[in-house]
C-alpha cells in the first residue's frame, strides 16, 4: 500500500477514530470520577553540624552533612521512624503500609530533606508529614555520633511545616481524559489500517496494477440514483458522468481494435453481482452511437437477465438457434439506439456448458460476425462456471468487469488465470461502481427532462411557423425526442446486482405525443428552442437507413 492508501483509509474510517477517541476520553473521565481523591502535604527539614569553628572545618562539615542527608532520606521511611508516628496518630496501619504513603527526597547538592505524605484526608496528610519530620529529627539525634564532650554533632530542624492541602492532587481529570482520548485515537487508527490491510476487495482501479499485464479500459462511477431511473444510463443520462465513462470504455476498445480487429467480445466478471450485464447493455449502446451494427447476445444460459432488463420476449433466443429450431434472423429483436439488436438467451437448457462449447455455437458466431460490426456476449461469471472462458476462447477476447467492494483481488487473479489457462485473451478490465466525489456528480448534472418553454404565450400562427422552421432546420430531431418515451416500470440500478428483477417494456411502433405522430411535436408543449436544446446530437443517431427505431427504457444491475 502507498501513503495515499493509508491516508484514504483514515479518511474513510474517520468516524471510527472519532468515536473511539470520544469513548477513550469518556473512560478517562469516568475513571477520574470513580477514583477516591488523594491529598498530599510536604514538610521540610534542614540538616546541619553543630561543630566547626574555622572555615575549613565548616566546609568539611557541609560536605559531611550532604553525605549524611542521603542516608537520612532512607531512614525517614524505616520502621524506627514510622512506628512511633503510627502510635502517635493512631493510624492503625503497619509501618510497611505507611511507608508506601510517605516519601523522602533531597534536592541535589542541598542538606534539605522534603517529606511528603499522601492520604485520602487532607488534614491527616499534613499530620503524617509533620509527625515523620519530627520523629526523623529525634531518630537522627539518637543514631548520630556524639562529640567528646557528649554534645550532639548533627542537628535537624524543621524549616517548613506541612500545610493542609486545599485540593486533591489525584485523580487528574484533564490528564486522564487526554490520555484516554489519545489512546482511543491510536486504537482507531490501528483499527482503520488493519481493516484496510485485511480487506482484499477491489476498491478502485488503483488495485488493478497489482494484477499484472492487464489493460484498464475504464472506471464506471457508482450511481446511487440509478435505481430510480426507468432506462439505462446511455438513454436516461446520455451526457452524464456514467455515460461518458461507458464511452471511454468504448473508445479504449476502439484503440484495441485498431491494433487487431475486434468483431466479437465477451463481457464477464469473476463472481456474480459485479455489474457485467449493465456494462454490456450500456457498452452496446455506446458502440451503437457510432453508427455501427451491434448485436447484444445474452449468453448466460443459467441465469439470463437481458430479456428482463430490456423488456423483450425471452422464450426464443440463443438456445433456440443452437438446437437448430430457428435462425438468427428469426429470433433477433431490434432494440434501443440505431444499429443495436438483442438476442435473448431463450429457454434454459439442461446442458448449458455443452451448448456453449459446441460446433453450433461456432457456426452461430461466424454468422453473427458476418452480419454485424460487433457482437457482444453477456456471459456468466468466470469462477462459478466455465462458459465465459469457453466463449472468450471462441471470440476475440474478454472484457472482465470488476465490481468495487464486491470482488476480492484473489478472486480476480484466479478468474484471469482461468482465461490464461485455456489460451483466451483478456482485452482489459473495467472497474464498476467506483466511488466518486460529490463534486464530480454535481459537475456532470443529470439531464433535465423536457419542459414547456418559459418564453410566454405566443400566437398559434407564430407557433406554426416555428414548427415549420424546426422541421426544415433539423429533420428527424422530433423522432430523436421520442427515444425512451415508452411505458416503463422502474428498472434496477446501474450498481452491481445480477439478480435485479425490474421489468421494462420497450415501445412498439411510433409513440404519440399530445396527439401528434412520432414525426411531429406539438408546439403547445415545446417551443423550438427547447427542442433544439434537448434534442440528441447528430452523432447519437436513432435510425439506420432512415428507419426510426424506438429506444425502449431499460437498465440492469448485473
Image (tube, rainbow, N blue to C red):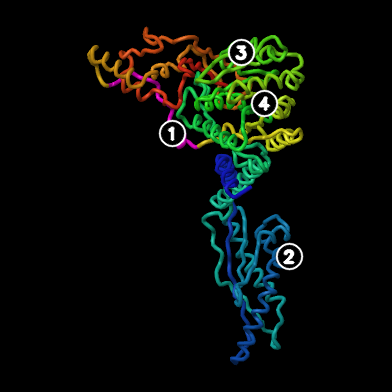
Tag 1–tag 2 contact (CB < 8 Å): no
Instruction: Label the magenta part by its dominant secondary structure.
Output: loop
Q: Secondary structure at mark 3?
A: helix
Q: Which residue is mark 4?
A: 272
Q: Secondary structure at mark 1?
A: helix
Q: Which of label 4 and label 3 is nearer to you?
A: 3
Q: Residues within 10 Å of mark 3 (few under 14, many from 20)?
A: few
CA–CA distance in space, label 1 to label 4: 31 Å
The reply, left or right, for residue 390 in relation to residue 526 is right
Name which of mark 2 and mark 4 comes first in the sequence.
2
| Residue 554 drawn above or below residue 220 | above
Name which of mark 3 and mark 1 comes first in the sequence.
3
Question: Which disc is residue 379 wearing?
Answer: none
Q: Which span is picked out in magenta? A: 437-454
Q: Which residue is mark 3?
A: 329
Q: Which residue is mark 2?
A: 79
| Residue 421 drawn above or below residue 296 | below
Name which of mark 1 and mark 4 comes first in the sequence.
4
CA–CA distance in space, label 1 to label 2: 79 Å
Residue at horizontal 62 percent and vertical 66 percent from the top: 115
Q: Secondary structure at mark 4?
A: loop
CA–CA distance in space, label 2 to label 4: 79 Å
Tag 3–tag 1 contact (CB < 8 Å): no
CA–CA distance in space, label 3 to label 1: 44 Å
Front position in the image: 353 or 3: 353
Name which of mark 1 and mark 2 comes first in the sequence.
2
- The answer to which quarter of the image holds residue 70 is bottom right
Question: Which disc is residue 442 wearing?
Answer: 1
Q: Is residue 312 magenta?
A: no
Looking at the picture, how far across and down is residue 265, in whole percent?
Answer: 64, 28
Amino acid at each position: 500500500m502507498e501513503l495515499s492508501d493509508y491516508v484514504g483509509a483514515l479518511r474513510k474510517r474517520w468516524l471510527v477514530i472519532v468515536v473511539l477517541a470520544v469513548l477513550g476520553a469518556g473512560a478517562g473521565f469516568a475513571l477520574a470520577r470513580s477514583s477516591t481523591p488523594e491529598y498530599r502535604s510536604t514538610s521540610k527539614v534542614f540538616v546541619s553540624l553543630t561543630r566547626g569553628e574555622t572555615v575549613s572545618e565548616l566546609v568539611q562539615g557541609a560536605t559531611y552533612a550532604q553525605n549524611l542527608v542521603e542516608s537520612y532520606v532512607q531512614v525517614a521511611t524505616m520502621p524506627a521512624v514510622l512506628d512511633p508516628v503510627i502510635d502517635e496518630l493512631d493510624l492503625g496501619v503497619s509501618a510497611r503500609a505507611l511507608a508506601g504513603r510517605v516519601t523522602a527526597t533531597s534536592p541535589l547538592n542541598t542538606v534539605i530533606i522534603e517529606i511528603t505524605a499522601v492520604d485520602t484526608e487532607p488534614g491527616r496528610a499534613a499530620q503524617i508529614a509533620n509527625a515523620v519530620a519530627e520523629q526523623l529529627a529525634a531518630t537522627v539525634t539518637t543514631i548520630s555520633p556524639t562529640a567528646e564532650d557528649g554534645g550532639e554533632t548533627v542537628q535537624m530542624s524543621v524549616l517548613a511545616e506541612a500545610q493542609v492541602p486545599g485540593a486533591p492532587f489525584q485523580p487528574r481529570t484533564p490528564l486522564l481524559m487526554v490520555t484516554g482520548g489519545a489512546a482511543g485515537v491510536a486504537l482507531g487508527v490501528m483499527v482503520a489500517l488493519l481493516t484496510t490491510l485485511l480487506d482484499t476487495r477491489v476498491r478502485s482501479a488503483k488495485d488493478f496494477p497489482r494484477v499484472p499485464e492487464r489493460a484498464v479500459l475504464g472506471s464506471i462511477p457508482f450511481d446511487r440514483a440509478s435505481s430510480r431511473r426507468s432506462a439505462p444510463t446511455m438513454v436516461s443520462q446520455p451526457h452524464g458522468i456514467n455515460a461518458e465513462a461507458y464511452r471511454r470504455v468504448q473508445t479504449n476498445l476502439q484503440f484495441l481494435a485498431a491494433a487487431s480487429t475486434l468483431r466479437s467480445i465477451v463481457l464477464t466478471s469473476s463472481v456474480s453481482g459485479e455489474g457485467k450485464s449493465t456494462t454490456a447493455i450500456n457498452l452496446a449502446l455506446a458502440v451503437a452511437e457510432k453508427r455501427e451494427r451491434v448485436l447484444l447476445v445474452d449468453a448466460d444460459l443459467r441465469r439470463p437477465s437481458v430479456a428482463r432488463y430490456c423488456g423483450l420476449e425471452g422464450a426464443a433466443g440463443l438456445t433456440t438457434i443452437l438446437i437448430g429450431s430457428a435462425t438468427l434472423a428469426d429470433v433477433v429483436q431490434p432494440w434501443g439506439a440505431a444499429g443495436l439488436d438483442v438476442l435473448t438467451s431463450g429457454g434454459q437448457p439442461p446442458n448449458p456448458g455443452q451448448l456453449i462449447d459446441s460446433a453450433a455455437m461456432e457456426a452461430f458466431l461466424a454468422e453473427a460476425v458476418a452480419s454485424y460490426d460487433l457482437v457482444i456476449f453477456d456471459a456468466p461469471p468466470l469462477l462459478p462456471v466455465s462458459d465465459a472462458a469457453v466463449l472468450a476462447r471462441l471470440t476475440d477476447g474478454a472484457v472482465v468487469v470488476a465490481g468495487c467492494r464486491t470482488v476480492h483481488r484473489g478472486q480476480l487473479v484466479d478468474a484471469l488465470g482461468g482465461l490464461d489457462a485455456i489460451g483466451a485473451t483478456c482485452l482489459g478490465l473495467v472497474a464498476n461502481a467506483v466511488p466518486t466525489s460529490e463534486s464530480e456528480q454535481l459537475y456532470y448534472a443529470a439531464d433535465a427532462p423536457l419542459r414547456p418553454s418559459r418564453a410566454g404565450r405566443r400566437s398559434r400562427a407564430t407557433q406554426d411557423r416555428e414548427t415549420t422552421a424546426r422541421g426544415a432546420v433539423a429533420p428527424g430531431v422530433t423522432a430523436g425526442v421520442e427515444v425512451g418515451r415508452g411505458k416503463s416500470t422502474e428498472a434496477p440500478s446501474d450498481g452491481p446486482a445480477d439478480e435485479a428483477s425490474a421489468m421494462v417494456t420497450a415501445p412498439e411502433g411510433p409513440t404519440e405525443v399530445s396527439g401528434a405522430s412520432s414525426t411531429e411535436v406539438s408546439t403547445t408543449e415545446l417551443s423550438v428552442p427547447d427542442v433544439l436544446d434537448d434534442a440528441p446530437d447528430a452523432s447519437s443517431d436513432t435510425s439506420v437507413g432512415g428507419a426510426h427505431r424506438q429506444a425502449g427504457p431499460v437498465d440492469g444491475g448485473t
